[in-house]
Image (cartoon, rainbow, N blue to C red):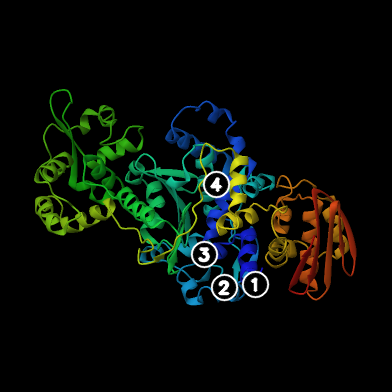
Amino acid sequence: MNNGQLEKYSSAITLSDMEIFVFPELMYSLVLANIMSPVIWRWRDEKCFKKLDGKGSYKKLLRLKQFILDNYEFNLDLETWGLTRQETELKRFEDHISPEQIANSNALFGYHGDEYYFDVDIRRHFGLDKYDSDIIPYWKTETVEAMDSFALKTSYKTGAGECVSLAGLYAAAAFIVCQIPLEDIYMILTPLHSQNFIDINGGVLTNNRRIVTKNMWFNGTALSNKAQRALRNEQITIVAHNTGNIHCLYDEATIDEVGYEGFLNKLNDFVSSSVTRLTLANFLRFNHEYQKYFQFCCAGCKGGAKFVRAEVLYHYEHGSRYRIADATHEKLIQEVSNEDLIPDKVSDRMCCKQLCAFIEYENLDIHKESERQKICEYLAPFVPDAAGFLDKLADFLHFVPQSPLNDKKFIDSMPINISVEQSREEIIEYLQSIRDRNATANLAFYTFRDMESCRWAPFVKAAIERNPVSIEKTESMDTDEIYSWLLEMGDESIYSGNRLAAPDEVVNFGTGDGLEKCFLLANIMHKRNPEQNIEINVNKSKVKLESELNFDFETSKNLSKKIVISGSHIAEFD
C-alpha cells in the first residue's frame, strides 16, 4: 500500500468521526462489518423476534427499536477513546480537505452550526466547549462487538454507542432482522449527528436508539423536536447507500444518481405536511403561546355541540393517554369536566376545525406565499400576529433539508448487491468476491478486523498511532509492570475467530487475547521510544515481542505473521 491507501485502510480500524468525514466509504464499511458479524444474526433467535416470523418488516422494525432501547445506552462520553490534537488530525488529511472546510463542517474543529445552534449553545450541550485549544477527543465509532462490550465497564449496565455507531447498528439490524433491503436504507450524516432514512411505510428515520415515523415527526412533542434538530439546522455532509455515497465537499459522487434523486424526493415528502386538524393541534401543542387564540369543538357531546379552550384541553391531554385531534380525541373530550365544556363558541377565538375547513374549502396551500395571505386575512380577527403565526406553522409543516446538491459528477460504481434471502456465509463469500472491484467491500473486512484476509500494516499503524487510552492508562507503570498487568487481565477477545481488538478496546473493556495484548504493549513501547525496533512474531498459539526487552504471550487466534516496527515504518512478513 502507498501512504494514502495505508491512511485510509488504517482509518477503517479506528473509524473516528474525522476519518469517516474524509473517507465517506468508511460509513458503509461499518454497516457491512456489522452484517458480517455473527452477533446480529443471533438476534434472529431471540424470542421477541422469533414470534414475529412471517410478519411484515415494519412490525419487526418497531420491535427492533425496543430491543435496541433495552440493550444499548446512548454514549456521549467524548473521552471514551482518548484525546488527540487538531494539528495532528489536520496534518493527516491536508491532502484531502482544507482546514477551513473541516472547521466549517466538523464539530471537533470549531463547527458551531447555524443560528439555532448558537442559541442553544450546542457545543456546551455536547460537552465540546471545554475543548477550546489544540486538544480534542477522538470521537470514534464502534462495531457491534465494541458496542456490546460496554456492558463490561462498571459504569454501564448494557451495551452502548454514540449516534454513528447506533446508525451503523440500525442499518445492519434492519437488513438482518427486519429483512429490509439495503436499497431501502439511506445513511444521513451531519456534523453533529448520524441517522438513517428507511424507505418503508412512508419513511422511518432512526434517531440514536429510537425511530421516528412521519406522524411522530409532526406530533409537536419535545422528543420529536429534538429528532428534527439535525436535519433542520445542519448541512447534510454525507449520504451513504449500497450504491455508493455523496459528500457535500467532494465533486464526485458514487451513489446512484436516479436513486439519490428519489431519496431526496422521499425525504422532502417525509418532512412535509399540510394543514389538518391533527397537524394544527400538534403545532399548538409545541407552540403553546398561540393556544390562547384557539378553541376545539366537541360536536358529539351530550346536549349538543360544546367548546373547550385550547389551553384547557392541552392541560387535560398532558395527564391523559388520549390525544387531541387523533383517533382518541373523543375519549379525551369525555375526560373534560362539565365546567370546562362551554355551550357556546368563544367569540374571540378561532375554532381549529373551522380554520381547517376554510383552508380545505378554499383549496389553499400554506406553503405558497400568495395563498397564505388569504389565510392571514381570515385569521387576523383572532390572532394578533397572524402573519407570524402562519410563518411558524408553515415552517413546522415543511422545510428543505440541506442535502448535497445534484451538481456533482456521478461516476459509475459497483453497488453492494446482497439480498435479505442470503445467509451470513453467502454474504461474506460474495463480499470477498468483489473486494478487488469495490473499495467499500474491501474496507469492510478491515473494519471487521479479519486478519486472515487483510494486510496487517493498517491494523498495526492504527494500533501504534491512534490508541491513546492505553498510553494514558499505563503512564505511571514501567514496562515490566505493564506486562504483569496484561497477564492478570482477562484473556477473552471481544471479537470472534481470527479478528483482533485494538489496544484501547482491550484497555476499555478489560479483556483481550494474548496477541491483542502484545499490540497494546507494542503501542506503549513505541510511544515511549519511537526509534526502537519492535519485532512481533506470531506463530499459531505463541506470540513473541522482541525489542530492548522481550515478552511472550499466548493466543487462541491461530494466526502466523511477522511484524517489524521501525520508527514510522511498518513491515509485515508471512
Asked if marks 1 and 2 touch (Cβ < 8 Å), the reply is: no
Q: Amino acid at mark 4?
A: Leu
Identify whether 391 is placed above or below 65. Answer: below
Across and down, in percent, residue 55 comes to 45, 28
Q: Amino acid at mark 1?
A: Asn
Which residue does the numbered mark 4 point to in the structure image?
Answer: 169
Identify whether 201 is placed above or below 208. Answer: above
Q: Which mark is residue 21?
A: 3
Label 1 SS: helix
Q: Earlier in the sequence, mark 3 or mark 1?
A: 1
Q: Earlier in the sequence, mark 2 or mark 4?
A: 2
Identify whether 364 is placed above or below 24. Answer: above
Residue at the limit of the structure toward the top, as seen here = 302
In the picture, which quadrant includes the N terminus? bottom right
Question: 28 or 435: nearer the eye?
Answer: 435
Tell me if mark 4 has few (under 14), some (14-19) or many (20+) residues whose alpha carbon lies within 10 angstroms of its own.
Answer: many
Q: Earlier in the sequence, mark 3 or mark 4?
A: 3
Q: Amino acid at mark 3?
A: Phe
Q: Which mark is residue 93?
A: 2
Across and down, in percent, residue 500 comes to 72, 53
* Tag in front: 1 or 2: 1
The residue at the point 44 percent across, 63 percent down is 411
Measure how far apart labels 3 and 1 are at the Cα level: 18 Å
Label 3 SS: helix
